[in-house]
Amino acid sequence: MTEDKKSELKRLIIYLAFSFGLAWLMFLLFVPGGKTWDELGQLKQSFIALGMLAPVIAHVITRLITKEGFAMTGEGSMMLGISFKNRKWVFYLLAILLPWIYTELGNAVTILLCPEIYDPKYYISLDIEKRLLLLLPIAGMVSGVIVSFAALGEEGGWRGYMMPKLIKLFEGKPAGKAWALIIGGIIWGIWHAPLTCIGHNFGTDYSGFPYLGILIMCITCTLMGIILTFVTEKTGSVWPAAIMHAVNNTSPSMLTGYVNYENVSGLKGMILPFAGRMIVMVLIIGILVIASGRKHNTGVNEKNKCSS
Amino acid sequence: MGGLLYKDFISVRGKRFVCFLCIFTLVFILIRVVFPGDRYYDDLIAYAADGSRINMIDIFLDMFAWMFIFMNMLFINRWTMEICSNDEKNKNHSFFAAMPYERHAYIASKYVFILIAAYVFFSVSQIWIIACGAFMSEGKTVDTLMAVNAMTLPVYSFMIFISAIELFLFIVLGKGKAMMIKVGFLLSIALCVIYILLFKDYSALIDKIGIYSIVQWVEKNSFSMTLLQILSPIITLLFYWASYKLCCLCCAGKERDYD
């Protein structure tokens, strides 16, 4: 390992120590012993979710310790600049629309996989008016863009610091970037572990609790991380990733009012809410890989033509 | 653009303000955590008309949070004026015209700066509301907090709407004329209010704008509230963009006349 890579690894370890330390400390301090995620109530859940700011705080602290500076744009920067030039606005638009597309399609796929979860009157038990269901996606997108500070807290750390360091560390190795993305996803998934252990996302009523939940969280984070790293690299900014993450967290889908996961229980009930979305995400990643591969090939062919 | 934004940040003493905002937020969260609403002090319990207990610590911290959020909104308005008048006083516009900046970058920087400020203030206000609500005793105070919180986004949108008008006036007409228009507008509103207070029956209006009637309205009209929360920022941002475009057009016209 070169000196450059050694110092990058050291910086990454400092960042991870602060990121995990701060978030897990907040969790330990404010989650009363024995209570599950649902028992906490909406307001307490929101307060615990402020732990999402830990990665960006860790990013700032790490930069202070390692004296890397606080540049907003360019290589090795905090990637907080915003530019719409060179069709970068397309990725901002994609960041807003893509979570809606994969959530809606994911719900549709889930209904196809398991028709018993379709409940045409489920929105009544959720205390939502039928006409309000039509507004849910756009409400999710608007609130995702405006109330994106918590997601910016996560993405400012994971995409703004960890991923560039991991990609640099794996540079020059076979399938280096793929490894960086997988390891990044696993770290991100494990970071959520304390919440998964009290039933966030998956509940507590499934076999293999909580290890299976942590495993599925790692897979989801890896898939999500690939798309988020893609938009971050294309725009050179963490903002589209933050917006996408925030919109994703609002689960903008009209079908939410018709999908009742309480109709299935156990392992099936735990995996199903994520299964459809994960299938659509894999398809999207496939499209992104093929599209960027085709663009790369076109670029190489044009270069060859010019040189010949 | 980054340089222009940083210049405005310095001109409003932004660094000091950010430090103040961070410290104030941390202290508020600490106080809220140390004095949670579910811990009852006998001297600090009040009873509502329906007999339910209300912890006065909740009310105090709730009011404190709303005061702080209201102050933040005033800062957006103040900074809109300040970033334009500071440049006018120091004749910065002619200096930037001689610099290799893109056309309209100067105007864009003013509009972007106010948007960033509004985003930061809105985010901090959300943190305050979350912290305040998380440790509140259950009951009427939580309902009030949630209902008033639902109004935060439309109110912030309204502040940006006002800023869009003010920025246009300050950049195109200059501080003197813009202040004349602003004071004239505020005076006419004040006169209208005085007229209503003196000569009209406003008792029905007071019943409608009471805090609990707002809470009830928000709870009953979830569809209208969601629509308001969606449309207010979209319409405001479209108006903001139109104001920027119009401002660029007027400034380009002014430069042509000058040439």
Image (cartoon, coloured by chain):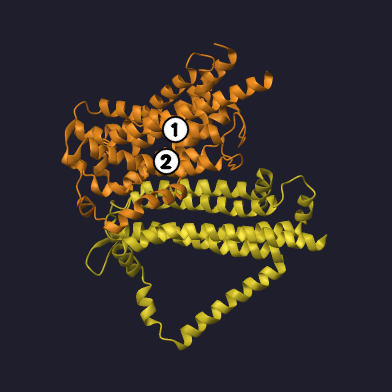
Chain colours: A orange, B yellow
Check the image and name the residue furthest to the right.
B259
Question: Where is mark 1, residue-wise?
Answer: A227
Q: Residue furthest bottom?
A: B199
Percent from the top left, x then y, of residue B218? 33, 63
Q: Which residue is disc 2 drawn over? A: A98
A215 left or right of A86? left
Sequence-wise, the earlier of marks 2 and 1 is 2
Look at label 2 and name its amino acid.
Leu
Q: Residue B138's x, y, as percent? A: 27, 55
Q: Is B224 located above or below residue A3 in the figure?
A: below
Do the residues indicated by labels 2 and 1 lie within the same chain of the protein?
Answer: yes
**Residue at 38% from the left image edge and 37% from the top image edge:** A26
Q: Secondary structure at mark 2?
A: helix
Quadrant (top left, top right, bottom left, bottom right) of the C terminus of chain B: bottom right
Q: Hey, what amino acid is under mark 1? A: Ile
Q: Are marks 2 and 1 in contact (CB under 8 Å)?
A: yes
- Which residue sits at x=76%, y=44%? B100
Q: Is residue A141 above or below residue B187?
A: above
Report the quarter where the N terminus of chain B lies.
top right
- Residue projecting furthest to the top: A1
Subunit that carries the residue with mark 1? A
Q: Which quarter of the figure has residue A222?
A: top left
Mark 1: which secondary structure? helix
